[in-house]
Amino acid sequence: MNGGPPPPGRGGGLATTVLLGGTACFLGLLGGLPLLLGPAVGALGVTASALWRTYGRGRGGAVALVPALLALVVLALTAPVAASTDLFAGLTGLAFLLWVADDPGRPAGGGRRAVPTIAPAALALGLAWAITLALAGQPQEVGLAGGLLAAALVLLAVLFSGLSRHAPAPPPPAKPLRQASPRHGM
Amino acid sequence: MIEAEPSSPPLGSVHWTWRASLLVAFGGGLIALAVAFRDAVPLFGGIPLLLAPLLAGSQGSRQLSGADLEWQASGLGPEVTITGALRGDLGSSAVDISIDVPRPPGATEAEPPRLERDPTAIRFTLRWRLSEPAVLTLPPPRIVWADPLGLTERLLVGARPSLSIERYPLSLHRLGSIQLARTTTLPGEIRSRVLGASGEFFGLREAATGEPPRMINWKATARDGRLLTNEYRIDRTGDLIVVLDVRPTSLGPDADDRLLAVARAAVHGIAELLLQEKTRVGFASFGEFLTTVPLSTGRGHRVRILRAIAAARREEIAGPAMRCALGLRRFYPRGVTMLVVSTWTEDPSFNLVPYIQRQGFPVVLLSPSPLPIRAGTGGLAPADEPLAERLERLERKVRLSQLWVHGPVVDWEDFWTLDPLSRILRRPTYRRVS
């Protein structure tokens, strides 16, 4: 039971689907696949996921993410190394997260409410892309640098979550001291 | 309230959902491919996927971890309305909390659930409709916080009481006014002292013909202008033993369980109402062997007997009817009214009534009919269903009519009324062995 009115700023999932489809198609256009095959792969994956999410519920709803993820993998692997393809691969990943948050089957979702989770990921992506631009011309080293950066960010996130989870609980309130009752008849 | 409290799940830990596992798998795969092929594009695609579950987990650990649940059931007859509130310092995360109330089998949703959320409480209302009378214990609902992406979940701790739902046949409350025969003395009571009136004053009633003068309340008679006598609480008490047949029948385990659930609800209601009236109630269930709760009254006995009723389950092996009758004779004094609750669809030797009656107990048979449960399950064409149902009803009537020589029989087909039973228990001639 998770009903009730939807949170403010909640869409029906269409806007984020269009956003994800748009970024995936553009990544396909920039990518190494023949001219129309790239956008077709992106559009097909996003459409399949959107339909699956609409008509399949329960655990099947989680599996609905797979077609879009597979399309992202195919497009990212076939894309040539360039600043634009790097950027659009990252943007497609972020758009995918927004689309995941905007699930109409989850009243508690919503892209705006997911900003605290997506913003640090976008920040990490922006940093990585900025470093790539700064070191343009040596893709292998950029890849390694990006990998190290991502690993450091992941480590930071893990440490942060672990510290918050094991925060010490506040001590229980102290019991009031019992007053000794006066004795009679000693 | 009656059944043992179900064990609560482990609390407070943050765990990833299937979505998070998928994102981590694909994100990790993309980064691994990026490193393997020395290609930066999959790396950029994988970073958001890999970071999102970790960030969602760290957010989850900062959210609230405690909220107390209060809930209650109301309604009449088949209607069940559950209202509840989850209280705590929920803040803006109230919208992320879901409450999963398990709907018991046999209950259908009459209206969609309603939720109202504010920073201090989540209030909910559920409306169900029960198909049959039932005594249920709803386990505590699973109350989960999930992040807006649905990547991490956290079970919330706090007070989680289970909820008891008791829905008896609507006319059961009329049984409370029935005066059953007293057949045995109370513990510590001496027979000779019962010759006169004794016990706690209950009320006044009009004097019957032949009432001894010492029973007359002369002051009340003078005030009212007609002969009134005192009535004592002890005069109103009686004895009843309820025998629940939990043997397997040819109907199959599913139908047996469903009929037994209906029978348990009826027995539960009968025992509770009669115990409220200080009537002494005993309970016995018979499967392969006899399990008994002695004849008594009082609050402690109420708890004991209701626990025994709730624990009665269908047994795999059927004991012989003679064993039940001999066991009852051993545990209970002769002459106590026996209410046998049994579906009885088998051959005559399976039936408990003649054997119990031969041991000196006046017997009333309450037989929950399997016809309402089996209707439409025979795989017949819709046009043939009424004819098949009519034939089955006739066959059952013929079988049950043969038992009237041993005692009154109630063919219980409409599970939401017990008027035929209360009518029979009101007739004094059925309560004693002639």
Image (cartoon, grey):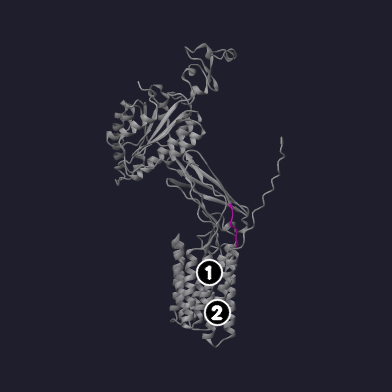
Q: Is residue B318 left or right of residue A122?
A: left
- Residue B64 located within the stretch drawn in magenta: yes
Q: Chain of mark 1?
A: A
Label the magenta part by its dominant secondary structure. loop
- On screen, residue B229 above or below B269: above
Residue A90, position as x, y percentages in the image: 53, 76
- What are the residue bounds of the magenta stretch? B62-67
Marks counted in the figure total 2
Q: Nearer the viewer, residue B120 or B320?
A: B320
Q: Secondary structure at mark 2?
A: helix
Which structural element holds mark 1?
helix
Mark 1: few/some/many CA within 10 Å (<14, 14-19, 20+): many
Labels 1 and 2 positioned on one and the same chain:
yes
For this orientation, the residue located farthest to the front is A186
- Expressed as whole percent of the image width and height from the top left, the position of residue A25 reads 49, 75
Q: Is residue A15 above or below residue A28?
A: above
Query: Residue at image x 52%, y 23%?
Result: B233
The residue that label 2 is drawn on is: A148
Q: Which mark is residue A97?
A: 1
